[in-house]
Amino acid sequence: MCKIFASQDPSRYELQTRRLRLNGQSTSIRLENSFWRILDEIAEMNEMSTPAFISTLHSEVLEQRGEPKNFSSLLRCACLVFLDRKTDRDVTHLAAE
């Protein structure tokens, strides 16, 4: 059952740290490569750089809920929301054919 998960390429879950500015503050964020790829895709779809997208997201979260306790976890969950919605769109598109 777990072979598909256990046999994945280790580069998918290798951690990568990127330095960026959030609301003018220099910081670094450490995520698995798979999540960085999704964030890069989201940013590209919005015609933004990944740091600009992440900074915009951070600003919106601050405005709506205040400082997040774990921004890296928020980014991972944002990726999951994106994938869920992308899957929903794909399923809707297939149903229309």
Image (tube, rainbow, N blue to C red):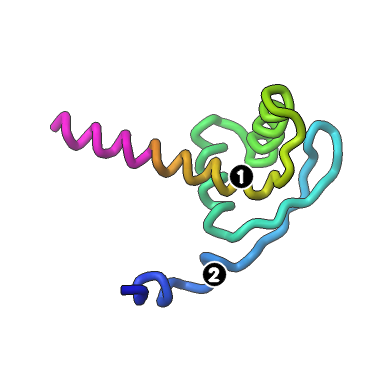
Circles 1, 2 touching at the beta carbon (< 8 Å): no
Kindly give the residue lying farthest to the right in the view shown.
25
In the image, 84: left or right of 71? left
Asked where in the image residue 71 lies, by quadrant, the reply is: top right
Which residue is pictured at 35% across the width and 76% down the height?
A: 3
For the N terminus, which image quadrant? bottom left
| Disc nearer the start of the sequence (1/2) | 2
User: Which x, y percent locates residue 91?
Assistant: 25, 38
Q: Tell me the magenta residue range.
A: 86-97
* Distance from Cα at disc 1 to Cα at disc 2: 19 Å
Nearest the viewer among 19 and 60 is 60
Of the pair 76 and 51, the residue shown nearer to us: 76
Amino acid carrying mark 1 in the image: Leu
Relative horizontal placement of residue 18, taking residue 45 as reference (left or right): right
Residue 83 spot, x, y in % from top left: 42, 44
- Residue found at x 62% / y 43%: 74
Residue at position x 75%, y 29% in the image: 66
Q: Secondary structure at mark 1?
A: helix
Residue 29: x, y in percent?
Answer: 73, 52
Per the image, the residue denoted by label 1 is: 75
Q: Position of residue 13 (x, y in %)?
A: 55, 66
Q: Is residue 78 above or below residue 59?
A: below
Residue found at the far top of this picture: 63
Residue with the mark numbered 2: 11
Residue at image location 47% in from the left, 40% down from the top: 81
Quadrant where the image shows the C terminus: top left
